[in-house]
Image (cartoon, grey):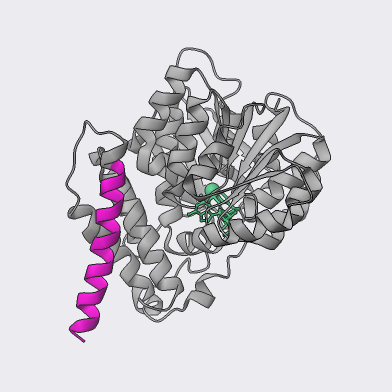
């Protein structure tokens, strides 16, 4: 169980819920980081009194330094500051809830410092899965999944025999706000429509990823790394109610699932208290009131991002990184009204095909692939606009 915790991305949807969990369990917070949200980070710093805080944005960090001048809290800035927080020496665990592959380097720093990792930041594993898993193995640190599906799988595997009896992972997907729609119907949907998720309150980027089902594609890749399975051992099933958070199937065809109301506080708390369980603020699950749970096949043609991610991890190497970074850029452009909804999948697919792959790669290669994929998307969008 975590005693002293660092939270990277503490001002976000997961970060703020993690602080709620820490407050209730009395877990000491030793460092907090954010991108630019000064007001909230100041408030958090005053309540939890960490040793240090960091903001990526230099100007915001200068502002925070002035605001916290009456405290002993060290205020750092830039990626260097975030990495220094990830290494804060007195903590045993880092919860990484940064959005995007910006979380990769701090993750590697936390592992290098011997911290256990509670990982919400799935893009880290998608872009640098091999590097992260190798580093964790070499340092002997544990990775506890925070993503609800992966926490579910992790929980379902607790009673599994030592000899691997895992046959399949059944990864559930809500289907997002556009489940059942055709490509024609999706051509003109807006970011405001895509931001209305049926079951979960989340940050903007992951909410759009849920609408395109890129999120499920990223989660397939995340599951491959976390549980050492191949892509063809993962079966994605649309389950609109988000009550079964995922399941595992063993060699004898027994299926074990984890259920609960859709509330991230359960997986966040489990990642911080493993192997123990404590009372949770989440409501109890009442199956009789729910009455029915439904399941359906995903529509891989309409939601092409899911197919692209499966192809990317089948190919391996740097392809998942290219697909992820292209999506980060395309997701951003869609949120800002610069491209249409269906263009996200088109751009991610084209960027993956353009990836200059290597099977033996290091962090510099991942960073270069990230940059090239983002540039590829920006260039393609500029060309498309120019040709209209
Ligand atoms: P949010 O957008 O709500 O929060 C992101 C956090 O990261 C904020 O603290 C933000 O700071 C900080 N941040 C943003 N960009 C950078 C950057 N470039 N460098 C450093 N810090 C940065 O995201 P969520 O909490 O929704 O998601 C976080 C991660 O967890 C994602 O990887 C997501 O896929 C995953 N996840 C989220 C779930 C959810 O329910 N929200 C469920 C499962 C997984 P600031 O506030 O200053 O911008
Ligand atoms: Mg999830």
Question: Which residue corresponds to the image point at 50% horizontal and 17% vertical from the top-left?
Answer: 140
- Marks counted in the figure total 0
* Residue 368 can be seen in this image: yes
In the picture shown, does residue 189 fall above or below 150?
A: below
Picture quarter with the C terminus:
bottom left
Horizontal placement of 230 versus 81: left or right? left
Residue drawn at x 70%, y 49% is: 17
Query: Is 41 positioned to the left or the right of 195 in the image?
Result: right
Task: Characterize the magenta stretch by its predominant secondary structure.
Answer: helix
Identify the image quadrant of residue 314. Answer: top left
Q: Is residue 251 visible?
A: no
Quadrant location of residue 327? bottom left
Q: Choose between 44 and 358: the one closer to the eye.
A: 44
For image coordinates 18% across by 42% down, the residue present is 357
Q: Position of residue 174 (x, y in %)?
A: 54, 56
- In the figure, 135 relative to 301: above or below? above
Tell me what residue is drawn at x 76 percent, y 47 percent. Answer: 20
Name the spot of residue 53 as percent of width and height, x first.
Answer: 64, 45
Whether 324 is among the magenta residues is no
Residue that sits furthest to the top in the current view: 163
Q: Picture coordinates of residue 131 (x, y %)?
A: 36, 31
Q: Residue furthest bottom?
A: 388
Q: Point out residue 163 in the picture as x, y percentages from the top left corner.
A: 46, 12
Is 334 located above or below residue 328 in the figure? below
In the displayed structure image, the side of residue 71 where residue 52 appears, left or right: left
Task: Looking at the picture, tell me which residue is in the foreground, 318 or 255.
Answer: 318
Look at the image and tell me in which quarter the N terminus lies.
Answer: top right
Q: Quadrant of residue 89?
A: top right
Residue 375 within the segment the image draws in magenta: yes
Look at the image and give the residue range highlighted in magenta.
366-388
């Amino acid at each position: 169980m975590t005693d002293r915790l660092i939270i990277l991305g503490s001002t976000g949807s997961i970060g703020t819920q993690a602080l709620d969990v820490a407050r209730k369990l009395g877990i000491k917070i030793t460092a907090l980081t954010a991108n630019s949200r000064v007001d909230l980070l100041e408030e958090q710093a005053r309540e939890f009194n960490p040793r240090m805080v960091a903001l990526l944005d230099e100007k915001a960090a200068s502002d925070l330094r002035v605001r916290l001048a009456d405290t002993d809290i060290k205020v750092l800035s830039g990626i260097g500051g975030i990495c220094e927080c990830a290494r804060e020496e007195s903590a045993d665990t880092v919860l990484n809830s940064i959005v995007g592959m910006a979380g990769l380097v701090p993750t590697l720093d936390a592992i290098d410092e011997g911290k256990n990792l509670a990982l919400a930041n799935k893009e880290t594993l998608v872009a640098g899965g091999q590097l992260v898993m190798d580093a964790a193995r070499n340092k002997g640190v544990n990775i506890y999944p925070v993503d609800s599906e992966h926490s579910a799988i992790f929980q379902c595997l607790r009673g599994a025999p030592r000899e691997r009896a895992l046959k399949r992972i059944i990864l559930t997907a809500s289907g997002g706000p556009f489940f059942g729609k055709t490509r024609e119907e999706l051509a003109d949907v807006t970011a405001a429509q895509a931001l209305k998720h049926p079951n979960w309150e989340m940050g903007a980027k992951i909410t759009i990823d849920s609408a395109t089902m890129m999120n499920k594609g990223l989660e397939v890749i995340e599951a491959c790394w976390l549980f050492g399975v191949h892509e063809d051992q993962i079966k994605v099933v649309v389950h609109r109610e988000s009550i079964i958070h995922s399941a595992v199937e063993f060699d004898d065809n027994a299926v074990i699932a984890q259920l609960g109301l859709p509330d991230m506080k359960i997986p966040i708390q489990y990642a911080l208290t493993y192997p123990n369980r404590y009372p949770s603020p989440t409501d109890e699950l009442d199956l009789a009131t729910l009455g029915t749970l439904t399941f359906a096949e995903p529509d891989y043609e309409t939601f092409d991002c899911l197919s692209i991610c499966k192809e990317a991890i089948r190919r391996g190497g740097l392809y998942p990184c290219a697909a992820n970074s292209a999506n980060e850029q395309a997701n951003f452009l869609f949120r800002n009204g610069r491209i249409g909804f269906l263009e996200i999948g088109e751009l991610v697919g084209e960027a993956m095909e353009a990836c200059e792959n290597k099977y033996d790669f290091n962090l510099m290669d991942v960073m270069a692939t990230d940059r090239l994929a983002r540039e590829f998307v920006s260039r393609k969008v500029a060309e498309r606009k120019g040709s209209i």
